[in-house]
């Protein structure tokens, strides 16, 4: 065994030397970006680096491990280029925190904000380079605060993250017997509803501002538990009494990364627009025909009150492709002919969703 460990020591020394070499290159890229006023975080390039690394990894090292290792290597590289600040919908130890960690790794500065509007405001004021907010849940639908902010903001979507939402029961207590009260965000209580009714039928269910706030409350009270991310257990010194207690196993939330500009093309992208059209018969059909005529796959459409005049609406659409693609360019030109208002609110590498619709999976 000693000989094998010597082998590992020798390989580790090589890995560290190579990481240093990579860091020097990233540092130089950072200087070029600074001189040209370009952002440090380039999601399209990260996608290509990841895809290439996973493709190269045909040996014994697991692909998921390669992705995790390179997530952190790239995160450390970003921190060498610029002190990146990322605002997210807090508090700490919530699912949005987990999403931000997934997108940016551990080496960037993540800053919790109290509301979705605060996240937008911090990035708009230039106090943070990027923002991370939830935009839709596979069970509950759109996060309307986020759509409403997107409508009036100069910020653009430059990335997306899907997170399977796994709810856990956390408590100071050692078993379910001692639990008489359960705190969570209303969404957490709803998602774990069947499990709670079955396993803790006599417990009082109490709403909290966030799953993290619920964990804090549970940490201060005997006989209390909370429903939320297992991340919060460490943070508040709680035990994880049960995991995956949410009703549907496919429960996932989609988050977006906000920046000043959208991402460059990767060949597998998504574009987001917001538009409105004259209220006349066939108005929506005509607008959407722009996508059909160009054979562009519409991934999602959502309507919201315009908030300018009562009973008028705007539509949010996500579709496959990038604004630099010829077909998308033509579709957007056609769409514009049918709309009274059209803004491109983002373009970003599309994430494949397990169990998602065809084309997205
Ligand atoms: O290629 C770049 O633009 C880099 O800054 C390098 C690098 C990397 O480490 O590979 C780091 C940050 C970017 O988000 C993308 C890639």
Image (tube, rainbow, N blue to C red):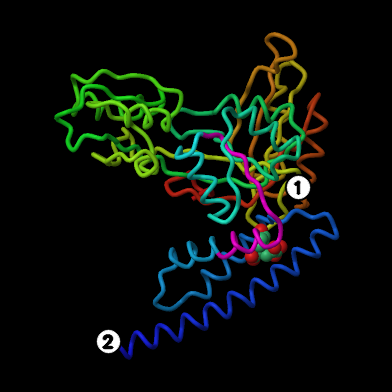
Q: Residue at x 58, y 38 (%)?
A: 88
Looking at the image, in which quadrant does ligand 1 appear? Answer: bottom right
Q: In which quarter of the image is the N terminus?
A: bottom left
Numbered range of the magenta stretch: 73-90
Res. 280 image quadrant: top right
**SS class, disc 1:** loop
Mark 2: C-beta under 8 Å from nearest atom of ligand 1? no
Q: Where 48 sits versus 199, above or below?
A: below
Whether residue 45 is visible here, answered yes or no, is no
Which residue sits at x=53%, y=71%? 55
**Residue drawn at the location 75% of the way across and 43% of the way down:** 260
Relative image position of residue 204 (x, y in whole percent): 26, 18
Q: Distance between the residues labelled 2 and 1?
A: 56 Å
Q: Is residue 134 above or below residue 23?
A: above
> Which residue is identified by label 1?
323
Q: Where is residue 301 in the image (x, y as percent from the top left)?
A: 61, 31
**Looking at the image, is 43 positioned above or below residue 51?**
above
Q: Residue furthest bottom?
A: 3
Q: Is residue 261 magenta?
A: no
Dot 2 or dot 1: first in sequence order is: 2
State which quadrant residue 281 falls in: top right
Q: Which of 264 and 100 is in front in this view?
A: 100
Q: Is 88 within the magenta? A: yes
Left or right: residue 14 versus residue 155 is left
Residue extending furthest top? 310
Q: Mark 2 points at which residue?
A: 1
Is residue 221 among the parts visible in the rendering?
A: yes
Question: Which label sits on residue 303?
Answer: none
Residue closer to the observer: 187 or 222: 222
């Amino acid at each position: 065994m000693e000989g094998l460990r010597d082998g590992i020591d020798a390989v580790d020394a090589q890995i560290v030397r190579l990481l240093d070499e990579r860091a020097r290159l990233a540092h130089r890229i950072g200087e070029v970006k600074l001189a040209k006023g370009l952002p440090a975080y380039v999601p399209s390039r990260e996608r290509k680096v990841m895809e290439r690394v996973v493709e190269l990894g045909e040996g014994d090292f697991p692909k998921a491990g390669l992705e995790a290792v390179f997530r952190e290597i790239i995160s450390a590289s970003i921190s060498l280029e610029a002190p990146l600040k990322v605002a997210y919908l807090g508090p700490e130890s919530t699912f949005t925190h987990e999403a931000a960690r997934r997108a940016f790794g551990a080496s960037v500065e993540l800053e919790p904000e109290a509301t979705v509007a605060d996240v937008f405001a911090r990035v708009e004021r230039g106090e943070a380079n990027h923002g991370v907010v939830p935009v839709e849940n596979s069970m509950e639908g759109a996060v309307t605060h986020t759509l409403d902010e997107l409508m009036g903001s100069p910020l653009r979507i430059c990335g997306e993250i899907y997170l399977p939402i796994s709810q856990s029961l956390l408590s100071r207590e050692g078993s379910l017997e001692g639990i008489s009260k359960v705190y969570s965000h209303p969404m957490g209580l709803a998602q774990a509803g069947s499990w709670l009714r079955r396993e803790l039928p006599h417990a009082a269910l109490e709403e909290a501002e966030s799953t993290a706030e619920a964990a804090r409350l549970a940490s201060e009270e005997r006989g209390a538990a909370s429903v939320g991310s297992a991340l919060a257990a460490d943070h508040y010194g709680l035990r994880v009494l049960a995991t995956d207690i949410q009703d549907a196993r496919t429960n996932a939330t989609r988050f977006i990364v906000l920046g000043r500009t959208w991402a460059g093309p990767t060949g597998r992208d998504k574009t987001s627009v917001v538009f409105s059209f004259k209220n006349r018969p066939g108005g929506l059909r005509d607008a959407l025909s722009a996508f059909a005529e160009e054979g562009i796959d519409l991934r999602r459409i959502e309507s919201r009150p315009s908030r300018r005049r009562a009973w008028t609406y705007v539509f949010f659409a996500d579709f496959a492709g990038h604004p630099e693609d010829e077909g998308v360019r033509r579709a957007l030109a056609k769409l514009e002919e049918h709309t009274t208002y059209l803004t491109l609110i983002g373009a970003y590498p599309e994430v494949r969703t397990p169990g998602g619709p065809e084309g997205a999976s």
